[in-house]
Image: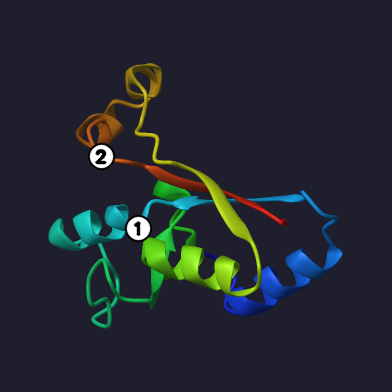
Amino acid sequence: MYVKDLDNVARESYRILNSKGIMIISVTHPIKWALEQQKGNIKTDSYMGYLSETSISWCIAGSKKMDMNLLTRPFEVYVNTFTKFGFRLETVSEPAVTDEFVLKYPEFLSDRKTPYRLNLKFVKP
């Protein structure tokens, strides 16, 4: 989500990995951005929803007001990009915020029932 040229990442990863090499992609789940837009927290007018690929500015350090630009991409963009360059998708996981995390950071209580990460395991055949 911090890389603009995802094609280059997929191409070069495939090139340098040995056969049966593994590429793990872990990003903030794309549904998070749709939910943040509903809450009015997205800082761009160009965000067009879950199925869009959009650059947004997001605060990564709470009260320190440290904004960072990132790209929101739908799930299919990651899958289609890496399989286009020869990878095989082996595993998908969509973990939510854990109860232990919510106990430490109660502000994430509303995130408990939605996926927080999108983790993809690709293998080079």
The disc, 2 or 1, on the residue closer to the chain's N-terminal end is: 1
Q: Which residue is mark 2?
A: 114
Residue 59 vs 81, above or below: the answer is above
> Where's residue 33, x and y in %?
29, 59
Numbered disc total: 2
Label 2 sits on a secondary structure element that is: loop
Q: Give left or right: position of 16 versus 117.
A: right
Q: Is residue 70 visible?
A: no
Front position in the image: 60 or 88: 88
> Where's residue 117, x and y in %?
43, 44
Tell me the kind of residue under disc 1. Answer: Pro
Q: Is residue 61 visible?
A: yes
Q: Residue at image x 40%, y 66%? A: 76
Q: Give left or right: position of 57 versus 91.
A: left
> Where's residue 22, x and y in %?
72, 48
Front position in the image: 5 or 36: 5
